[in-house]
Image (tube, coloured by chain):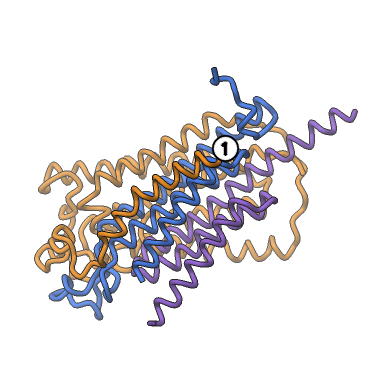
Chain colours: A orange, B blue, C purple
């Protein structure tokens, strides 16, 4: 009886979704907003090869700021609601192969993460992806060496300083540029080089550091409440 | 192809909704929320697709002068990018609350939490 | 039938099967892994829809980090359950 009711609700939801499917005939052209972003003179104003990065950091930079704030709030609530147990835990010993391999792999993974967010304006990637890769290096470290002294203060300071630099650069754009989060405060450079696109690589690098530090802190909180096994 | 992606996205959304409404275990409900998220993201990216075009990254193959006729829509992709990261934060928060509920009642069955039922 | 269409239909079938396993499998561990695999196949779908940025994010976050967080919480809940059973036996 209850299941029939749920089926009716989901069927109603499907009926609500159906017009979206029926009216969709496949796009043949870009929408007006996207073709504005893709026009030559507007691309040269931002000078970023990856248009998704241009949208995330410059045109919709305020959204990114709000998104980073939400992530910070989530990390803060998680740290607040998980109480730390400072008990010495005897965990199962990891195998020697795993430990040695992770010693080799962790620096390489971290380097890939830094590469991804440094080149965010030229190739696919950016601060969020690079931050997630950094956090996966940290989780490999936590899995291989569970009793390693994890310096969560360092991560917290990294995160705060990165957030401050992000907001500060955005405010400098409002002071000497044309608006909040304007990227033309630094020289735009030539199109397609590493040091181009004004402030975008700098802002995205700090976003990457911030996201990586936040996700690492969340993972460390989860790891620190594991019991013995 | 975009039709296939759109259909799959809608079915995945409804599967997630079904999981949220019928499953009794709280962990399964949270898995349902994450399935729902994935379906929404597929639908948004499929709506941004333009037939036979390539990714919005300008390089040697995508000329700067003719970019308007060669790339797909970058705006929904940027929105989905941030939505995925927020989804991770929200999932972690829900799991924390699941742990708290388990500490309170020693069970994860949703039917045993009747404190707010009248 | 173009090549891309066949691949996307196959991917769609696999994704729906993964969603079914994630909802209905008896074991929680298999369900969590199936949810992660759903994210992984979704990232291939994003690549076909020419969205490489979204594909990278989904592969790193949706199928990597969130699966690990699920496992941490599951492990925590299981170990507390086992401890209580031992206390009851005593």
Can residue A206 be seen here? no
Q: Residue at x 79, y 31 (%)?
A: C84
For disc 1, the marked residue is: A1
Q: Residues within 10 Å of mark 1 (few under 14, many from 20)?
A: few
In the foreground, A197 or B3: B3
Residue C66 position (above or below residue B73): above
Query: Outermost residue toward the top?
Result: B118
Which percent across, then down, holds residue A115? 40, 64
Q: Is residue C47 above or below residue C68?
A: below
Q: Nearer the viewer, residue B51 or A166?
A: B51
| Closer to us: A58 or C59 | C59
State the image coordinates of residue A130 (x, y, percent, origin top left).
Answer: 42, 58
Residue A68, percent from left and from top: 36, 43
Quadrant of the image occupied by residue B11: bottom left
Q: Residue at x 43, y 40 (%)?
A: A157
Residue B79 at least partly seen: yes
The residue lying at 51 percent from left, 67 percent from top is: C13
- Residue at mark 1: chain: A
The quarter in which the C terminus of chain C is drawn is top right
């Amino acid at each position: 009886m209850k299941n029939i009711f749920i089926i009716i609700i989901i069927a109603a939801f499907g009926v609500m979704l159906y017009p979206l499917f029926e009216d969709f005939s496949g796009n043949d052209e870009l929408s007006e907003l996207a073709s504005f972003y893709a026009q030559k003179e507007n691309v040269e104003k931002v000078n970023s090869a990856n248009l998704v990065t241009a949208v995330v950091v410059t045109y919709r930079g305020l959204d990114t700021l709000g998104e980073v704030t939400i992530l910070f709030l989530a990390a803060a609530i998680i740290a607040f609601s998980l109480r730390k147990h400072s008990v010495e835990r005897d965990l199962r010993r990891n195998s020697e192969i795993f430990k040695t391999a992770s010693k080799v792999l962790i620096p390489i993974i971290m380097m890939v993460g830094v590469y991804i967010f440094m080149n965010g304006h030229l190739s696919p990637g950016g601060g969020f992806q690079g931050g997630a890769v950094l956090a996966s290096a940290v989780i490999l470290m936590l899995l291989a060496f569970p009793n390693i002294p994890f310096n969560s203060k360092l991560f917290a300071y990294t995160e705060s300083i990165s957030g401050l630099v992000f907001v500060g650069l955005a405010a400098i754009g409002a002071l000497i540029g044309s608006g909040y989060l304007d990227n033309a405060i630094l020289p735009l450079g030539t199109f397609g080089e590493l040091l181009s696109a004004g402030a975008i690589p700098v802002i995205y690098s700090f976003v990457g550091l911030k996201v990586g530090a936040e996700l690492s802190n969340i993972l460390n909180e989860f790891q620190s409440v594991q019991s013995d096994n | 192809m975009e039709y296939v992606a759109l259909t799959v996205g809608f079915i995945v959304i409804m599967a997630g909704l079904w999981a949220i409404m019928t499953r009794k275990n709280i962990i399964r409900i949270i898995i349902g929320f994450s399935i729902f998220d994935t379906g929404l993201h597929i639908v948004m990216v499929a709506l941004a697709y333009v037939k036979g075009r390539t990714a919005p990254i300008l390089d040697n193959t995508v000329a700067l002068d003719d970019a308007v006729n060669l790339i797909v829509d970058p705006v929904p992709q940027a929105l989905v990018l941030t939505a995925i990261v927020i989804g991770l934060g929200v999932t972690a928060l829900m799991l924390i609350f699941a742990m708290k509920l388990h500490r309170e009642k020693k069970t994860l069955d949703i039917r045993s939490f009747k404190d707010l039922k009248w | 039938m173009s090549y891309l269409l066949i691949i996307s239909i196959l991917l769609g079938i696999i994704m729906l099967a993964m969603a079914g396993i994630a909802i209905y499998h008896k074991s929680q561990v298999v369900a969590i892994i199936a949810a992660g695999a759903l994210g992984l196949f979704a990232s291939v779908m994003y690549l076909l829809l020419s969205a490489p940025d979204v594909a990278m994010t989904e592969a790193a976050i949706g199928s990597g980090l969130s699966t690990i967080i699920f496992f941490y919480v599951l492990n925590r809940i299981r170990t507390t359950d086992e401890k209580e059973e031992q206390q009851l036996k005593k």
